Amino acid sequence: MKIIGREEFTDDQLSYEVKLGARFVVYQYCISALIVTFKRPSDIYFIGREENAVTKGLGFSALTLLLGWWGFPWGPIYTIQSLWVNFRGGRDVTGEVLASVLRTPQQPGA
């Protein structure tokens, strides 16, 4: 998965920001077409300590509200689940991201 918003931080800066309250989250969205329903995770988003995670996920919530309900029977179920996750600020994956990013050796020139 791609991490959006991390580009400007070194690993040390990233650790510092997380200690101050920043986090990484994944949103959900749902798309339905009558008998087929897909529930998918977004890319990983870096949420700064002063940013609102719910606001960042509004696009995924809007997509879900427009296209998620129309599948039977999973459309309404997945739509409600996705909205629940998004309106709680997304699913926090900070621990997993830090473990992955900080143990991965940096490529020369990266």
Image (tube, rainbow, N blue to C red):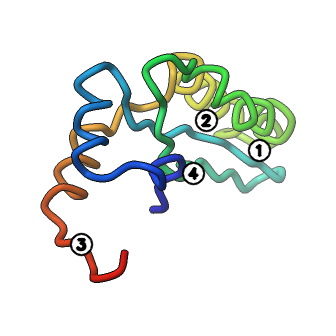
Residue 27 x, y percent position in the rendering: 54, 38
Structural distance between the alpha carbons of marks 1 and 3? 44 Å
Q: Secondary structure at mark 1?
A: loop
Closer to viewer: mark 3 or mark 4: 3
How far across and down, in percent of the image, does residue 86 sit? 58, 26
Task: Kindly identify which residue carries mark 4.
Answer: 40
Q: Dot 1 corresponds to which residue?
A: 71
Residue 106 marker: 3
Camera-near label (2 vs 4) is 4
Q: Nearer the viewer, mark 1 or mark 2?
A: 2
> Gap between marks 2 and 4, in whole Å?
10 Å
What is the number of the mark on residue 78? 2
Amino acid type assigned to the residue bearing label 1 in the image: Gly
Q: Residue at x 37, y 75 (%)?
A: 110
The numbered mark, 2 or 4, whose residue comes first in the sequence reads 4
**Label 3: few (<14), some (14–19) or many (≥20) C-alpha neighbours in 10 Å:** few
Tell me how far mark 3 sits from mark 4, CA to CA.
29 Å
Q: Are marks 2 and 4 in contact (CB under 8 Å)?
A: no
Residue 49 vs residue 10, the one in the foreground: 10
Disc number lying in front (1 or 3): 3
Q: Are there few (<14), some (14-19), or many (20+) residues within 10 Å of tag 2?
A: many
* Left or right: 91 in relation to 20: right
Tell me what residue is drawn at x 42 percent, y 32 percent.
91
